[in-house]
Amino acid sequence: MPTFTISVIPGDGIGLEVVPAATRCLERVASRHGIGLVFNEHPWGSEHYLATGRMMPTDALDTLAASDAVMLGAVGHPDIPDTETLWGLLIPIRRGFQQYINLRPVRTLPGVRGPLANDAPIDFLIVRENNEGEYSEIGGRLYRGSPDEIASQLAVFTRRGVERVTRFAARLAHARTGVLTSATKSNGIIHTMPFWDEIVTELAADEDVQVDSVLIDALAARMVLKPESLDVVVASNLFGDILSDLGSALTGSIGVAPSANLNPERNFPSLFEPVHGSAPDIAGRGIANPVGQIWSGVMMLEHLGASEAASDLMRAVEEVLSAGLATPDLGGSTTTAEFTDAVLDAI
Ligand code: NAD
Ligand code: IPM
Ligand code: MN
C-alpha cells in the first residue's frame, strides 16, 4: 500500500478547526483508495510563540523535510505582530523549501453563488510567484516615532525567479487554452515590471503560448467584469496575493479557496494551505468553512499522485455543497462539524 507521511501544522485560530476537518476527510478517502496517510502533527504557532518566543523550533525545517508534504492551517494572532507570526513560520517554510509556485485555483463550486449579478461559472488558475518580488527581506524602518521616520522596502525580481514561475504558468496555459494572462504594472515609474514583461514575453514564446499582458489595476476590474475571459494568470508575489483574495470572494467566500505552495523540482516537500488566514473574528465558534482546507488537501493528494482519491474527495465536497449545506460565510447555518460529517458520509 503506498503510504505518505504528512506533517500537519494546524497553527492558529480557525486553523485549529478546519485542519482536523480536512485530515478526517483525507484519512477516510485515502483508506477507501488503499492509500496510507501518516499524519505527524506539530503544535507550532502563536501558542508555541507565547510559551517559547519562537513560532516553531529551530530545527523545524529538518523535521518537515522528512515528510512527503506539509499541511498548514493558518498563522496569525491578534496579540502578536504579524511580522513575528508570518516571518517566524509561513515565510521560512515557503522559502526554505523553495516553494516558488503558489497555485491558487479560482473556481465556482456547484451550489455556491458568488456576488456577481450574472452568475456565470468562473474557472481559472492564479500562479503566484511565492519566494521573492515585493516580499523581499530588504528594507526597514529608521528614526521610529520621529517626524523624520522612514519605512522602505526593496522589491527584488531575479531573472531566475521570474523565468521559473513563468515557465510553470506557461506550461499550464499550454495544456489549457493556450493563453497566459500576465499581471503587470509597467506603466508606473518602476523598474521591476518592464523586466517582468520582457521575461514573460520571452518564455511564453518559448512555451508556445499567447501572452495577454494586463495592468494589475485593469486586471482587478476585469476579474469582476469578465472573469470568464481568464484561464491562467501569472502574477508577482503581492499582485497574486491580492488577486487571490478577490478571486475567492468572486467564487462565494474566502473560506472555500485552496492553495498549493509547490516546489516543482520535488527536492523539498510542498505545502498545502487555504488562502484564508486564522480568522480571529470567528475562531472558536465552530462555524469556519472547512472547504478551503479540504480542497487544499485535494491538491495535496494530486501532488502525491493519488489522483483518484483526490477527485473522489472533491466530488464528495461538491455533492455536499450541491445538497445545500453551507456554513455562515456562504449564507447558511451549517457548522464546521456538520459539514465535515456530511463530506465523510459522501466519501
Ligand atoms: P482572514 O482570511 O483570516 O479573514 C478574513 C475574513 O474572512 C474574516 O471575516 C474571516 O472571518 C473570514 N474567513 C476567513 N476564512 C474563513 C473560513 N474558512 N470560513 C468562514 N469565514 C472565513 O484574514 P485577516 O482577518 O486579514 O487575517 C487574520 C490573521 O490571519 C492575520 O494575522 C493574518 O496575517 C493571518 N493570515 C495568515 C495566513 C496564513 O497563515 N496563510 C493567510 C492570510 C492571513
Ligand atoms: C497568503 C497570506 C500571506 C501572504 C500572508 C499571511 C503573509 O496572505 O497566504 O495569501 O501574503 O502570502
Ligand atoms: Mn493572502
Image (spheres, grey):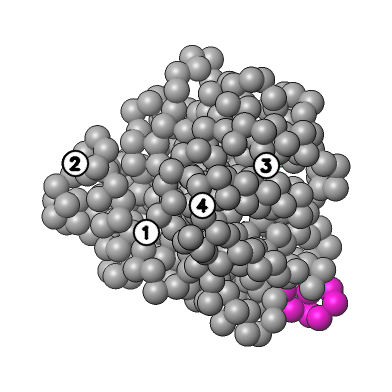
Q: Nearer the viewer, mark 1 or mark 3?
A: 3
Marks 2 and 1, the one that precedes in the sequence: 1
Marks 3 and 2, the one that precedes in the sequence: 2
Q: The residue under label 2 is which amino acid type?
A: Gln
In the picture, the disc for residue 290 is: 3
Beta carbon of the mark 4 residue lies under 8 A of ligand 1 = no
Q: Nearer the viewer, mark 4 or mark 1?
A: 4
Given contact means CB atoms under 8 Å apart, are the residues at marks 2 and 4 in contact?
no
As measured in the structure, the alpha-carbon distance from the residue carrying label 1 to the one carrying label 3 is: 40 Å
Query: Which residue was labeled with disc 4?
Result: 34
Residue 303 location, x and y as percent? 43, 55
Beta carbon of the mark 3 residue lies under 8 A of ligand 1 = yes
Query: Which residue was labeled with disc 2?
Result: 210
As measured in the structure, the alpha-carbon distance from the residue carrying label 3 to the one carrying label 4 is: 24 Å
Q: Is residue 298 above or below residue 117?
A: below
Q: Is residue 34 above or below residue 140?
A: above
Q: Residue at x 63, y 85 (%)?
A: 59
Q: Nearer the viewer, mark 3 or mark 2?
A: 3
Q: In the image, which residues are magenta?
A: 49-55
In the picture, the disc for residue 190 is: 1
Near mark 4 (Cα within 10 A), the count class, few <14, some 14-19 or many ≥20, is few
As measured in the structure, the alpha-carbon distance from the residue carrying label 2 to the one carrying label 4 is: 41 Å
Residue 9 location, x and y as percent? 67, 64
